[in-house]
Image: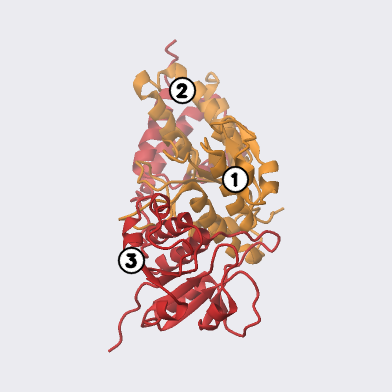
Chain colours: A red, B orange
Amino acid sequence: MPVAAEPPAIVLVRPQLGENIGKAARAMLNFGLEDMRLVAPRDGWPNPAAGPAASGADVVLENARVFDTVGEAVADCAHVYATTVRKRGVTKPVVTPEAAAAEIHGRTGRSAILFGPERSGLETDDVALARAILTVPINPQFGSLNLAQAVILVAYEWSKGQDLASPTAEDLLPPAPQEDLDGMIAQLEAMLEPKGFFRPESRAASTRRTLRSLLTKPGWNHLEVRTLRGVLSHLAKPDRD
Amino acid sequence: MPVAAEPPAIVLVRPQLGENIGKAARAMLNFGLEDMRLVAPRDGWPNPAAGPAASGADVVLENARVFDTVGEAVADCAHVYATTVRKRGVTKPVVTPEAAAAEIHGRTGRSAILFGPERSGLETDDVALARAILTVPINPQFGSLNLAQAVILVAYEWSKGQDLASPTAEDLLPPAPQEDLDGMIAQLEAMLEPKGFFRPESRAASTRRTLRSLLTKPGWNHLEVRTLRGVLSHLAKPDRD
């Protein structure tokens, strides 16, 4: 029986600074990822520097599991990606975060994404465990992604395929009915007529068309049209002071 | 003559920590963005904490321009996005970083993306300047994106379309630069002020915002703005007959 794709595990391989582990946890949770796995963290685990850097993503750190080797960390995973910025002497498919996210959503079984140590990145043996290389396309003149930034881009792409990724859509009002707009245009034209705006007479029709086009373009809703009619009414009044 | 879409300007509005400005510069340059603009940075500029945090993205910091107001910072920009995580009482289109990037690549004229101060985010007046809200869809149970993370997601999305940059030239004129629009709004406000439109005083700021939002929505081009300024000039004249 096929099982729906689970959120991928984020595997930090030999991470150095606790602060970066915390930042990675924060990056993950922002986009709904909670399964963090640590392989031989340099300074042991737990690490007191991780908590403050996680800015509240404590649940990720509390549930993080520690392993001695990459192999053990991904033992339950069907699809393993190795994140790297450098070109490697290995022949594996290379995918972007976007393509990896699409693959993960389209598959059954758990996926894991490996991230190497801050300074050196993954070693060849780590990469050998992976089925594909995940690379973020980057400025060839300036490639300087840190660990948490790489994690956030991968998590962000994954989140796009989730239902939680719903933008706070505001309900936009539809454009006002044509008759509302016509009323406003008529009001404006009546004000402009005595000011000589439509002269010479030979150009009056074209000027009216231009004005109508301008005022049709915005697609103002009925509240906006009402406000604008208030503006016009005020302009027609004598100055108060 | 249509001009290909330029890379967007990243506008940091009242940023607090120099370190975060440096991190934002690093995030930008990773994905090929170099036009950084600072509005009233809290600790002045240059800021000695920015350089080390930029990890080599010095060119972005060196060329960063400083402005007193958001209006001045985006004066040459035709499309302004306000980045915000919170739901706002404004009716503007809400787009994801992905959708914003697609729009920017499909348009002519320069775009600007506003990012608010670290703690508080953009104020309502800043948002009023923008044509659309840019929101990163995020875990509803844990939304904790910092400034540099928001910048990197936007820059990353933009970089994806870089090679595809609009070969299909648009015949439509781009929206007028912000300063043209500001000129028109100032003209209208000067006319409305003596008519009592902005009274009572307690509601004046909100009325001005409403008016600005209304007039920002259309995306009028410079010819249209010129026509509308002619309309306003005529309305200010005495009746001829």
Mark 3 crowdedness (10 Å alpha carbons): few <14, some 14-19, many ≥20: few
Note whether A186 is above or below A71 in the view shown: above
Question: x, y percentage for residue A164?
Answer: 33, 62
The residue lying toward the viewer, choosing from A185 and A113, is A113
Q: Is residue A31 visible?
A: yes
Q: Quadrant of the N terminus of chain A?
A: bottom left
Type of the residue with mark 1: Gly
Q: Residue at x 61, y 42 (%)?
A: B50
Disc 3: which residue: A163
Output the chain of dot 2: B
Note whether A218 is above or below B184 in the view shown: below
Check if mark 3's residue and mark 2's residue have beta carbons within 8 Å: no
Q: Residue furthest bottom?
A: A1
Q: Residue at x 59, y 30 (%)?
A: B44
Residue B192's mark? 2
Q: Nearer the viewer, mark 1 or mark 2?
A: 1
**First in sequence: mark 1 or mark 2?**
1
Disc 1: which residue: B22
Q: Nearer the viewer, mark 3 or mark 2?
A: 3
Q: Quick check: B125 left or right of B175?
A: left
Report the number of numbered marks. Answer: 3
Type of the residue with mark 2: Leu
Q: Quadrant of residue A137?
A: bottom right
Question: x, y percentage for residue A35?
Answer: 36, 68
Q: Secondary structure at mark 1?
A: helix
**Both on one chain, marks 3 and 2?**
no
Mark 1 crowdedness (10 Å alpha carbons): few <14, some 14-19, many ≥20: many
